[in-house]
Amino acid sequence: MSEESGAVPLPSWLKADLFEKLLSERFGDEFLAIRSFKPVDGLQPGENYSTIMLRLHFEVELKDHSTENVSYMLKTPHDFEMYREILKKNNMFVVERDVFLQVIPELEKMYKEAGVDVKFGARGYEIAAPDDYVLLQDLKPFGFKNVDRLEGLNTAHTKCVLKKLAQLHAASATRLHVKGPYSQKYLQPTYADSMKDSIEQVAETLGKYFLKCLPLYEGYEEYSEAVHKIQPKIVDLMYSMNTPDPEDFIALNHGDCWTNNIMFRYEEESSEPAETFLVDLQLPKLTSVAHDLMYFLLGSTKFEIQLSKFDYFIKFYHDQLIENLELLKYPAEKTPSLRFLHSQLLKYGCVGYHTVLMLCPPVLLDRTDDANVKDFVTESENGDGLKMAMYSNARYKKHVSAILTWLNNRGALLVK
């Protein structure tokens, strides 16, 4: 058997024999050996700041001496100490494995029992790795792919994502109603407190560059005061969503639903997705569905429809939510109205500002081979250039000028 790595930096523990049990289970009695193992970079340069994503290619020899090609996706942490500490404090790799192995299958089973086939994402697997990891089914051979984050999602793709989010929210809200709170520590409010200091440090660092660039944004005179008031409070505001008001419509939120964390499959020459999968589930939240909606719609849609169709998209999502809640027999008296859903979006307008500050900068930045999480979250000579580019490039200025004006006009930036 041969092992190849190419130019991709690999964890020292990544060896083919870690996957023998998994492949043996996949092929059963026909499995003989791993003939070759080749890990390659799973994403384009400049597409992933937070983790190392590898595509693992295996050539498997069967007992009849034929061969099969198999691939998986492996996510592992960067060596950057600060970010590794953030990941470890929140057990983000353990969390994501559990979501793929336990939480999502339970929700999919609910739909199956209701007579509907709903899949939320890739299948997860376990191996005896000595370090943090998430191992997933490789969706690329099945035709799944991302939409270019710099282009943003059009109306058809946006509706597909909103339909999937509505299915996720409806099933988890019903599960909460039927079974009560989840037992997983990572879905309890106190668990995330362990990483608050690190998040505050990141928000303070990014906030300096954002406020420095604020005068570059169109109409900044109208919202400058509101922005300066919300910036020092943004982490507390976002953390307050970990203990949502019991009157909120609470469900399991994806927590980081943006373009690169969504994959689409198409049939033949159709430009509209036949299936939509959610990936990168390391930040799930039990909170108001306003989080996923605001974060996704302001961070992933085409500029031309981002705000002009916002209310249309909320109405579409609400229709899908109601349909799925009825299917799963969620109590009618607890079902949120469209008016109530809009009130949730205003109540948690801080998510819009959080999206502008933390998500939009890397999403809207042109690709660069040397972009990395260390330069994004810390103050350094290299990081200074990266962050200034993030907050001052033409694409970001266009989007954020419009979003901040819109948030301000809705009163969504107001804080006590």
Image (cartoon, rainbow, N blue to C red):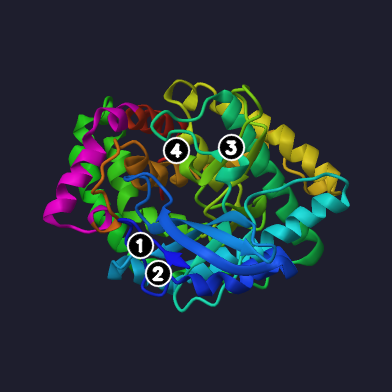
Q: Which disc is residue 209 wearing? A: none
Q: Which residue is mark 4?
A: 299
The answer to whether residue 325 shows anywhere in this view is: yes
Seen at 46% across and 26% down, the residue is 302
- Of helix, strand and loop, which one carries label 3? strand
Mark 2 to mark 4 CA distance (whole Å) = 24 Å
Mark closest to the chain's N terminus, 1 or 3: 1
Mark 4 to mark 1 CA distance (whole Å) = 20 Å
Vertical arrangement, residue 233 with respect to residue 85, above or below: above
Q: For the image shown, how many numbered marks are present on the structure?
A: 4
Q: Which residue is mark 1?
A: 199
Mark closest to the chain's N terminus, 2 or 4: 2
Q: What x and y, as percent, mark residue 347?
A: 53, 44
Tell me the kind of residue under disc 4. Answer: Gly
- Of helix, strand and loop, which one carries label 2? helix
Q: Which residue is mark 2?
A: 195
Most foreground residue, 249 or 381? 381
Disc 3 to disc 4: CB gap under 8 Å: no
Tell me the kind of residue under disc 1. Answer: Ile
Q: Is residue 39 magenta?
A: no
Prevalent SS, magenta region: helix
Q: Which disc is residue 264 wearing? A: 3
Disc 1 to disc 2: CB gap under 8 Å: yes
Mark 1 to mark 3 CA distance (whole Å) = 31 Å
Mark 1 to mark 2 CA distance (whole Å) = 6 Å
Mark closest to the chain's N terminus, 4 or 1: 1
Vertical arrangement, residue 81 with respect to residue 200, above or below: below
